[in-house]
Image (cartoon, rainbow, N blue to C red):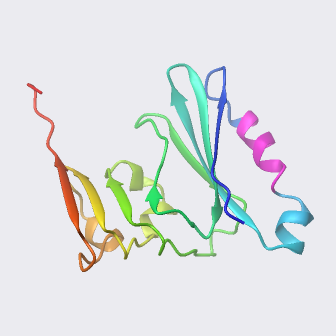
Amino acid sequence: MNLPIYHSIDEQNNAEKVEQYLATYRTPFWIEHHQWFIRCHWGLWMERLLIYVYSLPYAFDCFSILYNESNFNTKSTSSRKMHFSYDSVRSVAYDPSFFNDDVLSRIQLINTEILYLQFPIDHRFLSIIPNFEKLLALNVIIYTRNY
């Protein structure tokens, strides 16, 4: 199952709404019978609650994440002890603030071909992207006061 879903709710960040949404994937049909798990990222963007849901293991070539630095959350239907592969990821936009989440700080993106890198990077960068063997393109973003 490959499941990328973007969902938008026309209201402020509401953890209860996210829990209701995730509850539909916490049934025996998904977890016990099929061993299908999802991860959800959500945050507030332009006064709307944005939810990004994807299946585990991650099966997409671009690591697309919706977040707002001051209001970003992640949750999964799988146990925190379970680790899933992100081997299919080929394009990554590395923003250190995104990997502050405990679960996401432990992933490794080993097949990165296109990397969007925003300075400054942090101490987790080389553990998340441990090699550059397949890197074809590097795009560096350096923010200054004058764009």
Q: Which image quadrant for residue 37?
A: bottom right
Q: Which image quadrant for residue 124?
A: bottom left
Q: Is residue 67 left or right of residue 114?
A: right
When the figure is inspected, residue 124 is found, relative to residue 46, above or below; the finding is below
Residue 97: tell me if it is visible: yes
| Residue at the image point whose x is 31% and y is 68% from the top | 113
Q: Which residues are magenta?
A: 16-25
| Residue at the image point whose x is 53% and y is 29% from the top | 44
When the figure is inspected, residue 112 is found, relative to residue 8, above or below; the finding is below
When the figure is inspected, residue 124 is found, relative to residue 12, above or below; the finding is below
Q: Residue furthest front?
A: 136
Q: Nearer the viewer, residue 27 or 133?
A: 133
- The quarter of the image holding the C terminus is top left
Residue 25: x and y in percent read: 81, 55
| Residue at the image point whose x is 32% and y is 73% from the top | 127
Residue 72: x and y in percent read: 50, 40
- The quarter of the image holding the N terminus is bottom right
Residue 124: tell me if it is visible: no
| Residue at the image point whose x is 55% and y is 19% from the top | 47
Q: Is residue 65 left or right of residue 134?
A: right
Residue 30: x and y in percent read: 84, 64
Q: Is residue 102 left or right of residue 74?
A: left
Q: Is residue 48 magenta?
A: no
Q: Main secondary structure of the magenta part?
A: helix
